[in-house]
Amino acid sequence: MRRQKKQLELGTRIEFWARSIDEKADEFPFRILDQGKQVLWAVKRFSEFPEFYSYHHREACEVELEWNEGVTDFTWAYTYNPRSVSKTGITVLEFGEHLVERTGPEIDAWCASDPQRPRLHFSPVKHWMNDPNGLCKIGDVWHLFYQFHPAGTDWGPMHWGHATSRNLCEWLHMPVFLHPEQNLARLGATGGAFSGSAFRGRDGKVKFYYTERLPAYDLFAGYREIQKIAEPGRDLIEPERITTVLEVRPEGVEHDFRDPKVWWDGAARAYRMILGASIDGDPAVLLYGSGDGLEWQYLGPLYRAPARFRAEGARAVECPDFFRLEDKWVLVMGFVGHIEPTTGRHNLLYALIGEFAGDRFVPDAPELQLLDFGTDYYAMQSFEAEGRQIAFAWLFNWEYRKPEGSAYSGEMSLPRVLSLNEDKSKICMLPAIEVDERYVAIPVAPDRSGDYALPSAPIEIRLSGPLQGSKLVATEGGELAFEVSVAGDILSIRLAQDDGSIRYVAELGGGKDLRLFHDRGIVEIFADGGSVCGTRRGYANIEPDRLEISSSASAQVFERLAK
């Protein structure tokens, strides 16, 4: 047995996920003892499945933690005090030969020691992360929730992780916010607290509408998805109340029925909600209405995809977003299973711009705008704060995975601000000003050949002027890291892992500006004022040491470092 004394404040909580890795283990593989060796709390036996445990300490005193190393796998563990966690974040615990504790800057330093972890982009301390959820700003604090699997680095039963920031760039890790309503691992099932969004009601209180996927035994058919509201406590540490608000699907809608986005419609003087789904096999966005935010009535489809999407493999819409931008309405969607036949790309994100009145959305043009010509900018969620529409997306496309042995999987994009171009025919996305305020741009001078020796740090490349014929080639030890080119008004990107079977391209037209961020395998491109964006996530040659730029445009290269 391993033991370690620890001073606990009144109200301290210890939360962890653990499973047995030795069925013959002795009883009480984990105990908390007081100074008199009396048991305050104990787990008599862990199961073979990861389960969640929570201890709430009721008296300030020194305790002794006792655990049986080698027979228990603590997949994710932390402690916090509700009175101070908003300022300090959680303290991550590692139960091994010794108890290791990391808080705040110690967590950041541990993460930064990983040579494969990006520096500018948010990632979980450990384990699997996907869609951004519940994005909001309350007071001067930004809140990022995200899909999280606390028991491993692969997708599994979904929870909501949580992080906070005061500048959209530096994040404090917070306690897990939402849990599945059942222990899905023990059931041999998947599901849990799926994606959702934040909504500030007319009473000023923030609530989270989200989807619960009930225990699912098939990833492609037969599952049930219902809609819930989580009403948080004062410090957004955990929900005070969770209420199921929608269980019945409309006729023609099968299992995909998820990812709510809610707003108050001033004209209708009622609440409105959209959900991603399919109608008789066609990907669709459903519109619901409510007078109180609790009882919802189906108003009909807001959008139904053309037949070609179903023919090209799309099963449903997921993670729909619908919001007012300037004097227009914007609908953003992902199509599950869709493969673009001309390029082989999947995981693409599309948008429409139009008018919304009388519960009808009328696009200005029928053509869908491709928001990002890479395939690693997905499940985008945006929210309005201080007059800006700010978005994050998950950088992943299921085609490639992180190398074995990584402590985590999944990153978020840079925060982007959305706008419309001059004739309001396109959505533009550019990095939020906070990125420039937090990460100083230090010029990298070209050498005598005109090429650049790159630092072991994130970089930004800027081109200004005619982009036609431009080529950027970054290499690591002479091997390709990434290549970006403009030929025939087509902007394209290629990574080391690409075999040519998929083409990552976009029409650029007469664009005369380009910004490219590279951060340990993440490439984010913003061209023509952000009207053309491309995001890729690579896992080979992620620290390029040389950069060649061939372009008639003026070029600048910057090292981006935290202030």
Image (spheres, helix red, strand yellow):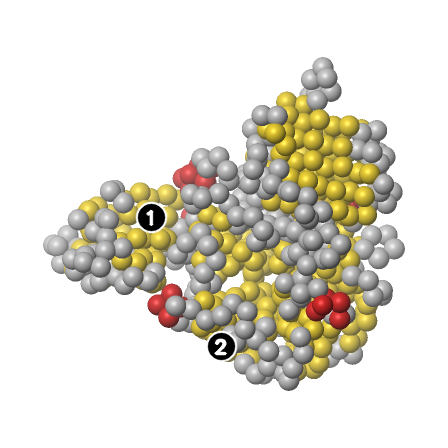
Identify the mark nearer the N-term, 1 or 2: 1
Q: Secondary structure at mark 1?
A: strand
Classify 556 as above or below 495: above
> Horizontal and vertical percent for residue 18?
31, 57
Instruction: Determine whether, in the image, residue 20 is placed left or right of residue 167.
Output: left
Which mark is drawn over residue 93?
1
Identity, as a three-letter code, of the amino acid under mark 2? Thr
* Residue at horizontal 81 percent and vertical 55 percent from the top: 426
Q: CA distance from mark 1 to mark 2?
A: 32 Å
Identity, as a three-letter code, of the amino acid under mark 1? Leu
Q: In this rendering, does residue 198 appear at all? A: no
Q: Secondary structure at mark 2?
A: strand
* Residue at horizontal 82 percent and vertical 62 percent from the top: 367
Depth order, front residue of 163/251? 251
Quadrant in which residue 484 is drawn: top right
Q: Quadrant of the C terminus?
A: top right
Tell whether label 2 touches label 1 (CB within 8 Å). Answer: no
Classify 174 as above or below 231: above
* Residue at horizontal 47 percent and vertical 63 percent from the top: 158
Instruction: Determine whether, in the image, residue 394 is placed left or right of residue 516.
Output: left
> Horizontal and vertical percent for residue 195?
55, 65
Which mark is drawn over residue 549?
none
Instruction: Determine whether, in the image, residue 510 is placed left or right of residue 69.
Output: right
Quadrant in which residue 245 is drawn: bottom right
Q: Residues within 10 Å of mark 2 (few under 14, many from 20)?
A: few
> Horizontal and vertical percent for residue 35?
15, 52
Classify 69 as above or below 245: above
- The residue where tag 2 is placed is 243
* Residue at horizontal 79 percent and vertical 45 percent from the top: 529
Classify 518 as above or below 317: above
Q: Residues within 10 Å of mark 1 (few under 14, many from 20)?
A: some
Q: In this rendering, does residue 352 appear at all? A: yes
